[in-house]
């Protein structure tokens, strides 16, 4: 279950709190606690945050997606991860 799914369930439960069983509410709160406990947070300096905002905007990615993309690219470039192989026999959009 994703964080947005859990948030939606909690919002729904809050809107109809009188109809939610204690057991269901307990389950939802435990799921939310797990998500909060496991949520990663990366604090960056102002200049890095600004650069990340620009990259995110240009690539139309969320902050987290941009961080994952940048880290993966760096790991591939520095040979910590294998480079994605392009399928030469696959279909390609556009023209050359």
Image (spheres, grey):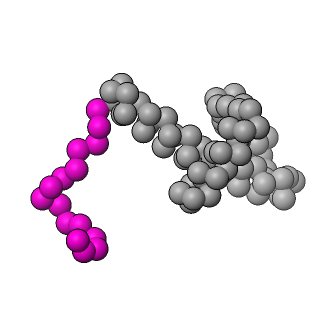
Query: Residue 82 at what x, y percent from top left?
Result: 29, 32
Viewer-proximal residue among 89 and 17: 89
Does residue 69 lie above or below 14 as drawn?
Answer: above
Up the image or down, 11 lies above or below 28; here it is below
Which residue is outermost to the bottom?
95
The quarter of the picture where the C terminus appears is bottom left
Q: Nearer the viewer, residue 48 or 67?
A: 48
- The picture places residue 77, in percent across and down from the top left corner, at 37, 33
Q: Count the marks.
A: 0
**Residue at 69 percent of width and 28 percent of height:** 37
Magenta: main secondary structure: loop
Q: Residue at x 56, y 40 (%)?
A: 67
- Of all residues shown, which one is farthest toward the top? 80
Residue 22 at x, y = what percent?
Answer: 79, 40
User: Which residues make up the magenta segment?
Assistant: 82-96
> Can see residue 34?
no
Q: Residue furthest right?
A: 18
On whether residue 85 falls in the magenta region, the answer is yes
- Quadrant holding the N terminus: top right
At horizontal 12% and vertical 59% (from top left) the residue drawn is 89
Front position in the image: 40 or 25: 40
Any part of residue 44 in sight = yes
Q: Is residue 47 magenta?
A: no
Q: Residue 31: x, y in percent?
A: 67, 37
Horizontal arrangement in the rendering, residue 91 relative to residue 43 (left or right): left
Q: From the viewer's perspective, is residue 24 above or below residue 82?
A: below
């Amino acid at each position: 279950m994703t964080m947005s799914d859990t948030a939606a369930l909690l919002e729904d439960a809050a809107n109809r709190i009188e109809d939610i069983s204690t057991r269901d509410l307990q389950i939802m709160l435990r799921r939310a606690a797990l998500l909060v406990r496991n949520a990663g947070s990366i604090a960056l300096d102002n200049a890095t945050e600004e650069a990340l905002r620009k990259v995110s905007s240009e690539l139309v990615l969320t902050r987290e997606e941009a961080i994952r993309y940048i880290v993966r690219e760096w790991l591939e470039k520095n040979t910590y991860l294998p480079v994605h192989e392009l399928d030469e026999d696959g279909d390609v959009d556009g023209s050359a």
